Image (cartoon, rainbow, N blue to C red):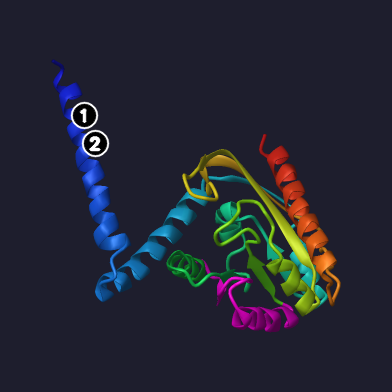
């Protein structure tokens, strides 16, 4: 019998056991010093991973001048992008003074620290998680800043826009800007959102829409209609981005 065939299952078993050990004693551990180490190391590693990977991309941008125009007008905006497409804008829009609205979950804590390492400002709590996050985001938007959020996050359903972004834009009396992101080739992870990671040397595109004004105040019927329209707008930006990476 070929010795390589005999040792292959043993090697896979060792790797599986090692990954289970890491998950149990590092990724999921509640020991205080392990949690602090995890919250320090993982965002640093993610930031380094994003920067090194993105340095190989061939990037096409379309419509990003909309943010400069909004700044000149002194207007804030709610920036919406699907939950699975945040890696590219996290890198391309870093260190611009933009805010990211990120949930208070365990995964959200890691994501918030990664965004902060990339130079983003962070507001904790999703648009549907409570009054405090909405009040903080409203104040930031009225000061003329950009607040980014994922309208299908933090738990889905995937690519189904929820009302939080529309309600926030109406409350702050500011427009929405939709982002579409695409990459070829890319890897889709086995997560609820099928998170997209562009592979090394991929063609990557990011497309921004024109500002989408939201009326204030809103009726229940308007919220339902605008939720559909904003979701459709993101999808149209996605199709335009996909066209650029073919």
| Tag 2 near tag 1, CB within 8 Å | yes
Quickly name the residue at label 1: 8
Q: Quadrant of residue 22?
A: bottom left
Q: Residue at x 16, y 24 (%)?
A: 6
Q: CA distance from mark 2 to mark 1?
A: 6 Å
Q: Residue at x 52, y 50 (%)?
A: 192
Q: Secondary structure at mark 1?
A: helix
Quickly name the residue at label 2: 12
Is disc 1 surrounded by few (<14), some (14 to 19) or many (20+) residues within 10 Å? few
In the image, 37 versus 160, the foreground residue is 160
Q: Is residue 10 left or right of residue 137?
A: left
Q: Is residue 12 left or right of residue 90?
A: left
In the image, 127 versus 7, the foreground residue is 127
Q: Is residue 150 left or right of residue 222?
A: left
Q: Relative to residue 213, is residue 11 depicted above or below? A: above
Q: Relative to residue 74, is residue 60 depicted above or below? A: above
Q: Is residue 204 magenta?
A: no
- Please state the horizontal and vertical placement of residue 204, each as a whole percent of the image: 62, 45
**Magenta extent:** 118-144
In the image, 131 versus 27, the foreground residue is 131
- Please state the horizontal and vertical placement of residue 58, each as a whole percent of the image: 60, 43
Q: Quadrant of the C terminus?
A: top right
- Please state the horizontal and vertical placement of residue 139, each as a whole percent of the image: 69, 84
Q: Residue at x 36, y 69 (%)?
A: 39
In the image, 214 versus 93, the foreground residue is 214
Q: Secondary structure at mark 2?
A: helix
- Please state the horizontal and vertical placement of residue 123, each as a whole percent of the image: 57, 76
Q: Relative to residue 40, is residue 171 depicted above or below? A: below
Q: Is residue 223 left or right of residue 61?
A: right
Is disc 2 surrounded by few (<14), some (14 to 19) or many (20+) residues within 10 Å? few
Q: Residue at x 45, y 61 (%)?
A: 47
């Amino acid at each position: 019998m070929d010795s390589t065939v005999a040792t292959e299952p043993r090697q896979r078993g060792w790797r599986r056991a090692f990954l289970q050990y890491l998950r149990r004693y590092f990724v999921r551990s509640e020991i205080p010093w392990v949690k602090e180490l995890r919250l320090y190391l993982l965002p640093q590693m993610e930031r380094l991973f994003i920067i090194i990977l993105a340095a190989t991309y061939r990037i096409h941008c379309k419509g990003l001048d909309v943010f400069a125009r909004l700044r000149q007008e002194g207007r804030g905006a709610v920036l919406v992008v699907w939950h699975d497409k945040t890696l590219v804008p996290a890198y391309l829009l870093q260190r611009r003074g933009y805010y990211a609205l990120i949930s208070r979950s365990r995964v959200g804590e890691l994501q918030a620290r990664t965004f902060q390492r990339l130079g983003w400002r962070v507001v904790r709590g999703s648009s549907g998680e409570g009054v405090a996050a909405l009040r903080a985001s409203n104040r930031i938007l009225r000061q003329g800043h950009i607040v980014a959020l994922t309208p299908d996050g933090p738990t889905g359903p995937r690519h189904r826009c929820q009302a939080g972004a529309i309600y926030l834009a109406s409350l702050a009396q500011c427009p929405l800007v939709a982002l579409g992101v695409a990459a070829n080739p890319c890897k889709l992870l086995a997560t609820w959102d099928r998170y997209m990671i562009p592979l090394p040397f991929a063609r990557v595109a990011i497309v921004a829409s024109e500002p989408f004004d939201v009326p204030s105040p809103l009726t229940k019927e308007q919220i339902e209609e605008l939720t559909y329209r904003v979701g459709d707008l993101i999808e149209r930006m996605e199709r335009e981005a996909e066209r650029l990476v073919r």
